[in-house]
Image (tube, rainbow, N blue to C red):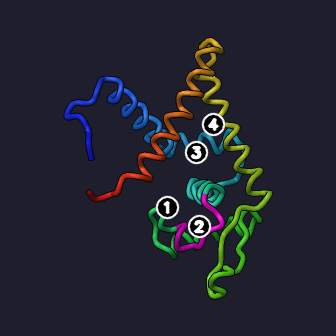
Amino acid sequence: MTTSPDPAPHVHEIASFMELVTDMARTPGYRDRLLQRARVPLTRSGSAVLSTVERAGPLAVSELAERLGVDQSTASRQVKPLQERGLISRTSDPADRRSSLLSITAAGRRVRSRVRDAVLDDIDTALRDWPLEERTRLGTLLDRFGAALRETVDSVPAHP
């Protein structure tokens, strides 16, 4: 891995921003606030499961557990109420009939959309005093940065 010994100040600022966003997303109070504002009857863990299944599904419970950093029995317990409420469906895995795959349902997508709208409202409020040109530029740069970061993470081995 080739990195400079002392990254430029803007690299530190970007890293600090990423830490802020990560910390906010993990803060129980912020997640509870989003769920309340979205008026969705989800727990924090239910929201994390639904979000993960939406982004990565269809996926096996074992893969969901790995992505959430919990054991498989915990993931199964978190899935059950979402499945009972029709937010997640379980189907046989065509590659292994003994296993099942989790997918988000149309009702689950509607719930996720309401939560996403609450997030977008927060972002819009934070940027309300910014000129449209600056908001647009920020969106463009973040999109470009996200793509470059995904490419970097995907291409660099975990252990050199």
Name the residue beneath numbered marker 4.
Answer: 119
- For discs 3 and 1, the disc positioned in front in the rendered view: 1
Q: Do residues under tags 2 and 3 come within 8 Å of each other at their CB atoms?
A: no
Relative to 93, does residue 43 appear above or below in the rendering? Answer: above
- For discs 2 and 3, the disc positioned in front in the rendered view: 2
Q: Which amino acid does label 1 sit on?
A: Leu
- Name which of mark 1 and mark 2 comes first in the sequence: 1
For the residues labelled 3 and 1, the Cα–Cα distance comes to 18 Å
Name the residue beneath numbered marker 1.
Answer: 68
Name the residue beneath numbered marker 3.
Answer: 32
Q: Which mark is residue 113?
A: none
- Name which of mark 1 and mark 4 comes first in the sequence: 1
Using the rendered view, name the quadrant where residue 7 is placed: top left
Q: Position of residue 73 (x, y in %)?
A: 51, 76
Q: Is mark 2 on a helix, strand or loop?
A: helix
Q: Do residues under tags 3 and 1 come within 8 Å of each other at their CB atoms?
A: no
- Name which of mark 4 and mark 3 comes first in the sequence: 3
Q: What residue type is labelled 4?
A: Val
- For discs 4 and 3, the disc positioned in front in the rendered view: 4
Residues rendered magenta in the picture: 56-64
Q: Position of residue 6 (x, y in %)?
A: 21, 30
